[in-house]
Amino acid sequence: MPLDPYFRAMYLARRRDLIAEAREVLVDFVTSAVTRVFPWRRDAAKRALVESPARTVGTKAAGTAVAGAEASHAAPASTTAKRPLSVEEKAKRKTPAWKRQNAQKWDTKLYGRVGLEPPEVEITDHQVDVPGHPTVRVRAYRPLDGTGTAQPLPAVLAFFGGSFQLGGVDYTSIDATFRTRTADARVIHVAVDYALAPEHRYPTQIEQGYAALGWLVENARQLGIDPDRIGITGISSGGNIAASVTLVNRDRAGHPLKLQVLEVPVTDLTGKSIDMAPIREMRIPRFLAHRELVQVADAYLGDRTRAREPYASPARALTHRGLPPAWIFTAEYDALRLDGEAYATTLRASGVDASAVRYQGATHEAAIYTKVVPLARRWHADVVTALKTLHD
């Protein structure tokens, strides 16, 4: 079906900004080349390539142009600069720290426009030691109990999305999502604030997630959690980590997991399941989409040949027997749609109960737009339904 009107307008603007950013790169490349050969021609070269003194400068964060990234974590697609950026300013904008700071500010601004106000819940932060890797913070969200009792509740270990490079439990949209799902499903969310790439590469995030799962099981009673009703969830890159942690858990400890909920997940980082059809339909230039997808894998893995490893690409595990039942949600206008759906097929082939639902007219990041897009509210309701099965 056609792209939802709200998302159509959003992507038309994004496409213009992608083209503007590509033009900016071209201007810099040609100007640099001309300057090396004819230093005195630098200004003339710029005048020939730049039609207006007010240049559009792309400021999107890494990996946010196409599927595989979340618009909620993206900086504003463009800003109009009053003057050309200096070399130093351009270099600063390429640093992970600048991108994350910019992305978090934008996330707060965007969610204020498109997301519903989250409910109050009880929140506690904890530190989990990870052998051989950085300590990881986990945040436990518990629904408020109006009865005055504190009965053990089901729980899910949760992983946010952000192309492995952005996001965190302090981001407005991520925190709001966990709050809302905790309250509506009455399922405790234990969110893993895993380390980000490229400073921390695979398998750091997997090991942190596995350590967090062990900590959750060990401390379930103290956290008010029923240790026999624990699941795992993840969105986009977080879906990759969640799926991988289920594999690691099966292969190592075998802690009982009752379900996995994977939303727009990337399960094969080799790119074999990437579907460029929705990218073409949104008229995003293929080379720009390909560049972003490659950048995500490079940032996370460092060495892309590691994408063939099953804990990097859970779809490539030799077998998926023994994994928990899976609820997988995909979006029609997302290059990862076949990735998630193929993973459901693979799980079923190994005897795992798995379903895949594709939301028509939706984009990769559609689920956070609960204030302005009806299908986002339906998406939320379906996730809550999946989580409520932990009460059975």
Image: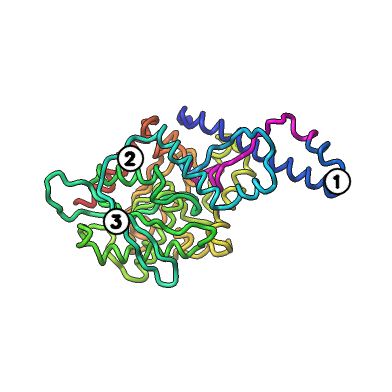
Along the line of sight, the residue nearer the viewer: 239 or 353? 239
Give how far across and how far down residue 40 sits, in percent: 87, 43
Eye-nearest disc, 1 or 3: 1
Lower position in the chain sequence, tag 3 or tag 2 = 3
Instruction: Answer left or right for 252 relative to 153.
Output: right
Q: Is residue 6 above or below residue 197?
A: above
Q: Is residue 56 above or below residue 276?
A: above
Look at the image and tell me whether residue 340 can be seen: no
Compute the Cα span from label 1 to label 3. 62 Å
Give how far across and how far down residue 217 sits, in percent: 27, 64
Instruction: Answer left or right for 92 relative to 156.
Output: right
Compute the Cα span from label 3 to label 2. 17 Å
**Mark 2 neighbour class, 10 Å CA radius: few under 14, some 14 to 19, many 20 or more:** some
For the magenta stretch, what is the residue range?
Answer: 47-71
Is most of the magenta stretch helix, strand or loop?
loop
Lower position in the chain sequence, tag 2 or tag 1 = 1
State the SS at label 3. strand
Instruction: State the mark number for residue 144.
Output: none
At a point 39% along the width and 62% down the height, the residue shown is: 136
Amino acid type assigned to the residue bearing label 1 in the image: Pro
Give how far across and how far down residue 208 sits, in percent: 40, 64
Q: Circle 2 is placed at which residue position?
A: 380
Q: Circle 3 is placed at which residue position?
A: 231
Q: Circle 1 is placed at which residue position?
A: 39
